[in-house]
Image: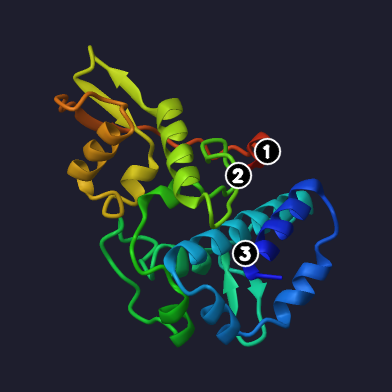
Amino acid sequence: MSLISVSRDFLRAAKNGNPVDEFLIGFTATSANHIIEELSDDNAKKVFWLNLYNAFVLIEFRTKRKLNYGSKVAFFQDVSLSLDEIEHGIIRGSKNKFGLGYLRKWRVSSFGKLARVQVMDYRIHFALNCGANSCPPIFMFSYKNLERDLDYLAEGYLMDSVCFKQQDIWLKVPRLCLWFFGDFGGFKGIKRMLKFYKIIAPDEAPKIGFLNYDWSTNTNNFSIQIDV
């Protein structure tokens, strides 16, 4: 079975509250070389790691364990990873967690260099769920429909979140756009994104502000939408 299929089954089991020990045992038997060889392009990497990340978050909440993003959650045969390392080291392409998207990590392992996504995709920020009320809903990704589904999630999250103020002169966007400012391409990139998803008209140029982030726990976001 492919790693992508395993990641989908793992996420489904986590969502349904089914046993996941078999998957965890399987991961410990999976070598770093196998991961690198099978996840040979950025889309495959994004599908696998997004599914894996969200599954581990679900497991943390389902087992009522305190979520610790620095603790190792993904154990493979010869490498172990934390949620932080999966998000920033692999999915964001070795970006510094606190660098607003402009700073890269100083030290990157050989596995990290080979396993990471090479081209930054800001849409991943609308696909990761950490269990907070302001998080996007969890989605189960497939290789075939990744582009469509990332656009679907980005558009939906923005449509639900963006807030117009003072007769549309000011526009407030999700806090994620500030935390990962460089990932979105700064103010110009944010406006370009808003126009692409038809949140604003092509000729509009509102001032941009940022919404607060609600960190209260919301397990209702744990409703996996399954693509077809």
For label 2, the residue is 138
Q: Is residue 64 visible?
A: no
Identified at 85% across, 59% down, the residue is 19
Please name the amino acid that badge 3 sits on: Ile
- Of residues 67 and 19, the one nearer the viewer is 19
**Callout 3: few (<14), some (14-19), or many (20+) C-alpha neighbours within 10 Å?**
many
The Cα–Cα distance between marks 2 and 3, rounded to whole angstroms, is 16 Å
Give the residue at the far right of this rendering: 19
Would you place residue 162 above or below residue 118 in this image?
A: above
- Of residues 36 and 215, the one nearer the viewer is 36
**Callout 1: few (<14), some (14-19), or many (20+) C-alpha neighbours within 10 Å?**
few
Left or right: residue 98 compared with residue 31? left
Residue 12 percent location from the top left of the image: 74, 51
- The image's mark for residue 223 is 1
Q: Are marks 2 and 1 in contact (CB under 8 Å)?
A: yes
Q: Which tag, 2 or 1, sits closer to the chain's start?
A: 2
Q: Are marks 3 and 1 in contact (CB under 8 Å)?
A: no
Please name the amino acid that badge 2 sits on: Ile
The Cα–Cα distance between marks 2 and 1, rounded to whole angstroms, is 6 Å
Please name the amino acid that badge 1 sits on: Ser
- Of residues 4 and 219, the one nearer the viewer is 4
- Is the C terminus in the top left, top right, bottom left or bottom right quadrant? top right
Would you place residue 87 above or below residue 122 in this image?
A: below
Identified at 23% across, 17% down, the residue is 168
Residue 77 percent location from the top left of the image: 67, 85
For label 3, the residue is 4
